[in-house]
Amino acid sequence: MKLLILGAGGHGKVVSEIALLMKKWDDIYFLDDNKVGQEINGIKVIGTLDKIKELRKEFTHAFVSIGDNMKRVEWFKYLEEMNYEIPVLIHPSSIISNNVKINKGTVIMPGSIINTNTVIGKACIINTNASIDHDCQIGDGVHISPGVTIGGSVNIGDNTWVCIGATIINNINIGKNCIIAAGSTVIRDVPDNVMIAGVPGEIKKIIKLNETR
Ligand SMILES: CC(=O)SCCNC(=O)CCNC(=O)[C@H](O)C(C)(C)COP(=O)(O)OP(=O)(O)OC[C@H]1O[C@@H](n2cnc3c(N)ncnc32)[C@H](O)[C@@H]1OP(=O)(O)O
């Protein structure tokens, strides 16, 4: 089986290492618009992202490793349209309850902990050392950044970015397309399309559609 990884930046490097550790694929290659011909940690960049369609005959599996939530979801949907098999990539050092559901296109980075009865959506990034406790619902295209701590029974809407080191107390609902700034502590529900910052977290601005990163 052969795996294509879309995006050979810093995030792509970490994603490719996880894919290698999983030992499921005989061959792994990158696509990247700016690095064609380069070799990154032993993995060749064989074309630009738009080559994904013609490579369908040759490759069974593909995975999007783009940090920007909107772009990642866009390419993820394109892979789905082309009937690529899209895996879940899980670093062996993560600790995940057997009663957790993780949907395709999501990567779980080293040291993450996901507790029982939590559901993680499609095309999410659960980044290094993030902790998501029991009974959480994480939407599609969400990025939980390094060192984030999320209490039990928290719901997070599609495309929301929880930035590095943020804390969300238990029983909180966070909307779609939000940014929770680095180091914030969220203690109240958050509506759709807002940026929250501070301790305790307060609304700092409204986010226009397609603005999340
Ligand atoms: C492996 C990896 O590296 S994964 C990547 C992880 N990276 C991150 O998590 C990045 C985190 N980045 C941040 O937290 C940034 O501050 C962002 C993304 C929230 C900034 O978003 P922007 O929309 O550009 O916000 P902007 O800079 O315009 O700030 C708006 C207001 O919020 C405040 N603000 C922004 N971030 C924070 C913060 N973390 N804490 C407190 N206040 C903040 C600003 O001071 C500003 O306040 P003011 O209006 O009173 O002057």
Image: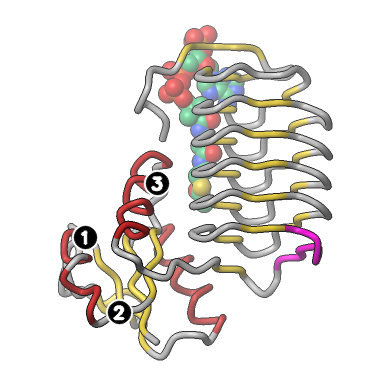
**Residue 76 image position (x, y, % from top left):** 38, 54
Disc 3 secondary structure class? helix
Q: Nearer the viewer, mark 2 or mark 1?
A: 2
Residue positioned 38% across, 59% down in the render: 64
Residue 64 lies in the magenta-colored region: no
What residue did someone put label 1 on? 49
Q: Nearer the viewer, residue 60 or 20?
A: 60
Label drawn at residue 73: 3
Say which quarter of the image contains residue 152: top right
Region rendered in magenta: 94-100
Would residue 33 be found to the left or right of residue 149 on screen?
left
Q: Distance of mark 3 from mark 1, alpha carbons?
A: 14 Å
What residue did someone put label 2 on? 59
**Residue 97 image position (x, y, % from top left):** 81, 63
Q: Are marks 2 and 1 in contact (CB under 8 Å)?
A: no
Q: Distance of mark 2 from mark 3, alpha carbons?
A: 20 Å
Residue positioned 68% across, 47% down in the render: 147
Q: Sequence order check: which comes first, mark 2 or mark 3?
A: 2
Three-letter amino acid code at the position of disc 3: Val
Which secondary structure is most common in the magenta stretch? Answer: loop
Would residue 50 be found to the left or right of residue 27 on screen?
left
Disc 1 secondary structure class? helix
